Image (cartoon, helix red, strand yellow):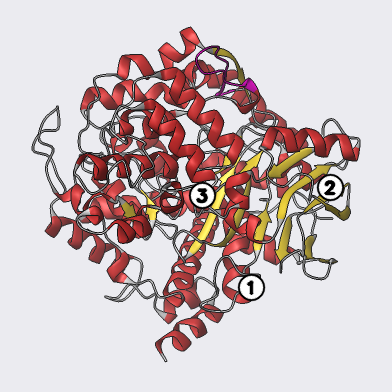
Amino acid sequence: MAYGYQQKVARIDLSTGLVSVEQPDGNFYRTYLGGRGFIAQYMLKELSPGIDPLSPDNKLIFANGVITGVPVGGCGRNSVGAKSPLTGAYGDAEVGGYFGVELKRAGYDALILEGKAEKPVYLWIKDDVISIKDATNLWGKPTAISQEEIRDEVGERLARTAQIGPAGENMVRYACIMNDLSHAAGRTGMGAVMGSKNVKAIAVKASKRVELQNTEGVKNLGLWLRDNYKTLAKRLADEGSGCVLFGLNRVGALPTRNFQEGSFEGTSKINSRTMKDVMVKRHAECWACPIRCKTVVETGAPYYVNPVYGGPEYETLASLGSNCGIDELEAIAKGHELCNSFGLDTISAGASIAFAMECYENGLLTRRDTEGVELRFGNHEAMLEMIRKIAYRQGFGNILAEGVARAAERIGGEAKKFALQVKGQEVPMHEPRWKQGLGVGYALSPTGADHVHNMHDIVYAAPGPELENMKSLGIFEPLPVADLSSAKVRLLIYKTCWQHVKNCLLICDYMPFSHQQTTDLVRFVTGWDTNIWELMKVGERCLNLTRIFNLREGLGSSDDKLPDRFFSPFASGPLQGTSIDRKAFQSAISTYYRMMSWDEKGIPSEGKLEELGIGWAAETIKKNAA
């Protein structure tokens, strides 16, 4: 009997309406675990090189992990992947809520959507029965309305949904997929891929259980989290992820006005404590999680914000707030609501607007270009208007809907200087001039700049729980935040590999579990006699597969870089004079290649791939070289 997984993957050919089911063996699950592991191997094996990400040739994969649906906090996540329309490379996004759990309980570990429906459709999954239904009447509607209408139509008030809004329908390149209205599979444009396939939503209602090999062991881990989260994750539980905003501003690392500065004078107006005082109504949770870090906000005039869309977290407070020079908390909350309603990644949306604001203030754009919108830093009305224009690809919003890399090409002149992106994806709200290992992680990320499958140097700069946890991987001594030595690169590799493990298992990054506790959870759920070493190899395997996919699609060592801005020092603030040293940065990249057994062009060696059990991927490298 299989424990922790259902041993079923469904393929839905949208062009023909044919649904088929495959049953991978147990070794497949142990090799890839789920999530990013599943997605990377399916994409590399099944997608033809050079396809248009928005064509029917792309595949959209919803994947759970072997711990998805286990009754322990952090186990309510799923992943969505495809070739990214934003980067033209490997794309995926992880998301919480309840949808992934419901899909697992329906009997499926993954869904693979192929082809393109002739007209708008949604998928209805009742237990293990998959139906394709007409969604013509839902097309164009915001997510809250379409979810309500789907639930009415299928007669299940508790059906869980993953859906797109108008941004996905209009194939905005950073459109996201929303689980249950307030949980976003935010990055790399998976909503645009879903829209390109004419799929509005997937709705699921199920009754199966996820079978556990050691129920008592799982229960005890859940009880440990219940008893300790108030100590280990207190601020998250009290304020949500916005709790870090004050601290980042204090040290001068809060992205401000398109990363021109690191301190924002309006921080006291937009931080999580102020939000808690004036608009937070309650906290919400993902499946089985006691931390309840998701804020739910509601405001009145001048901007009514509907609480069904949750509330802004740190990335949104910074991207729509400080990075746009905006200190109007109500407007930021409204911007968050609009993004969830339209299905937009708040990071890329805010970064695109901040980019446009800097272009406007430097004379590269005029009011004529923006249809009268005065795109100046601090103009919250302009920010809200541009979110709408982006989602519907109206006027100048149509240019920003392409992402900052393509928008800079359209605008011309010095616009490229202000387009802060890596491999085409906008930089998230974490400052690499302060956390410089993070900056190397941005440059090497398979999905473009990403802060989750990465490291945050500050937590390893002094003794503490994070450094204590890394001792199980052989990291014993703290390292300065700005250090880019070979020791920091080693730390980056080990941490990144473990983050890939998390994205295969689909466990929330906020869970305060140690490496050993996470490994124990996998053992208790599956019954495998696994260990930290084996799981780390899954992460390394996944990292190499995503690298090979990107090499095949034309990305190489020349794309492992950062925007020039991060090599220029801050002109003011606590980090005045601080920047990344180009020579040290490039040396760190080269060291990373060597430690990973990649050559000077960043190409994995055949021996490394054989060692990881994915020698089959070496053929892709040989064909690409030929």
- Badge number at residue 393: 3
Helix, strand or loop at mark 2: loop
Quarter-of-image position of residue 385: top left
Region in magenta = 292-307
Residue 69 visible in the current orientation? no
x and y percent of residue 261 in the render?
A: 20, 34
Looking at the image, which residue is at 25% across and 24% down? Answer: 264
Residue 529 horizontal side relative to residue 599, left or right = right
Helix, strand or loop at mark 3: loop
> Up-down: is 562 above or below 359?
below
Q: Nearer the viewer, residue 310 or 106?
A: 310
Identity, as a three-letter code, of the amino acid under mark 2: Ala
Q: CA distance from mark 1 to mark 3?
A: 24 Å
> Residue under circle 1?
57
Quadrant location of the N terminus in the rendered image = bottom right
- Badge number at residue 106: 2
Residue 166 visible in the current orientation? yes
Q: CA distance from mark 1 to mark 2?
A: 27 Å
Q: How many other residues sit within 10 Å of disc 1, few (<14), some (14-19) or many (≥20)?
A: some
Q: CA distance from mark 2 to mark 3?
A: 36 Å
Q: How many other residues sit within 10 Å of disc 3, few (<14), some (14-19) or many (≥20)?
A: many
Q: How many other residues sit within 10 Å of disc 2, few (<14), some (14-19) or many (≥20)?
A: many
Residue mark closest to the camera, 1 vs 2: 1
Total number of numbered discs in the rendering? 3
Quarter-of-image position of residue 298: top right
Quadrant location of the C terminus in the rendered image = bottom left
Residue 235 horizontal side relative to residue 583, left or right = right
Q: Main secondary structure of the magenta part?
A: loop
Helix, strand or loop at mark 1: loop
